[in-house]
Image (spheres, helix red, strand yellow):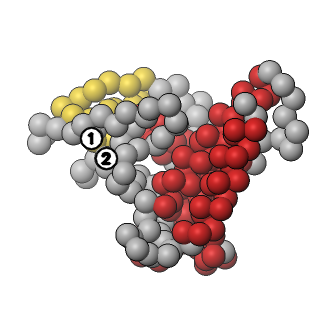
Amino acid sequence: MTPLLSRTNAEAHLYMDLHPCSCGEAGFPRQSAVVALADGDLASRYTGNCTGCGRERSFIFRLPPTVTTAGSDFRYGGDEPSQLLDPGEWLLVSDAYAGQVPAQPASGDATRRARAALSRAVAALDEVGKFIPTGGLTVPGEALVSDRGRQLHRREPGRFRRDRLAAIRDAYADLISRLG
């Protein structure tokens, strides 16, 4: 099997977190190495033993030909859509990060954690938008390839509209700016 492209380390780690061991445990201490693939491209290999059952876990991700620089904002990848997660999975990731933010974060560490979670929620929403074709209004159904992504789309198709994604993204970005 050809390793899928991971545009950033953050995207690779998120993918591993979302794909638990057969015992159900997602966590494992990860050791990483850069390896050469048979075609000469480079890849990141992550290995470690499952913290639940001890089974060896291994993931290999193709590295991009050029490195994406994040700038000052947190990003999961460049301008192209993810090959690892579909738009429904990205929307669920955004929901999970936004759900970590208390209604009134206290100052200090709680505020820092809230900003970090909202930054990741915004980045995940940006990933959903990358699946909408230029000039399109919504994520096409065929872009949803995971069971959880298709289930979310069946339950709430309106959440995949460009205008709705932008409104939620803007609300999160506004909250980040108000948190300082």
Q: Position of residue 140 (x, y in %)?
A: 45, 76
**Amino acid type assigned to the residue bearing label 2 in the image:** Leu
**Amino acid type assigned to the residue bearing label 1 in the image:** Pro
Q: Specify whether 18 is left or right of 56.
A: right
Q: Quadrant of residue 156?
A: bottom right
Question: Does 52 sit above or below residue 173?
Answer: above
For disc 2, the marked residue is: 5
The C terminus sits in image quarter: top right
Q: Residues within 10 Å of mark 1 (few under 14, many from 20)?
A: some
Depth check: give the residue in front, 117 or 145: 117
Residue placed at 73% from the left, 44% from the top? 175
Residue 22 in view: no
Q: Quadrant of residue 136?
A: bottom left
Q: Position of residue 105 (x, y in %)?
A: 84, 34
**Of label 2 and label 1, which has the lower sequence position?**
2
Q: Position of residue 42 (x, y in %)?
A: 21, 34
Numbered tag placed on residue 64 in the rendering: 1
Q: Are marks 2 and 1 in contact (CB under 8 Å)?
A: yes
Depth check: give the residue in front, 179 or 77: 179
Residue placed at 49% from the left, 61% from the top? 129
Question: Marks 2 and 1, how far apart in space?
Answer: 7 Å
Secondary structure type for disc 2: loop
Depth check: give the residue in front, 63 or 30: 63
Q: Position of residue 161 (x, y in %)?
A: 57, 72
Question: Does 140 sit above or below residue 76?
Answer: below
Numbered tag placed on residue 23 in the rendering: none
Secondary structure type for disc 1: loop
Question: Does 17 sit above or below residue 155?
Answer: above
Depth check: give the residue in front, 72 or 123: 72
Residue 126 in view: yes
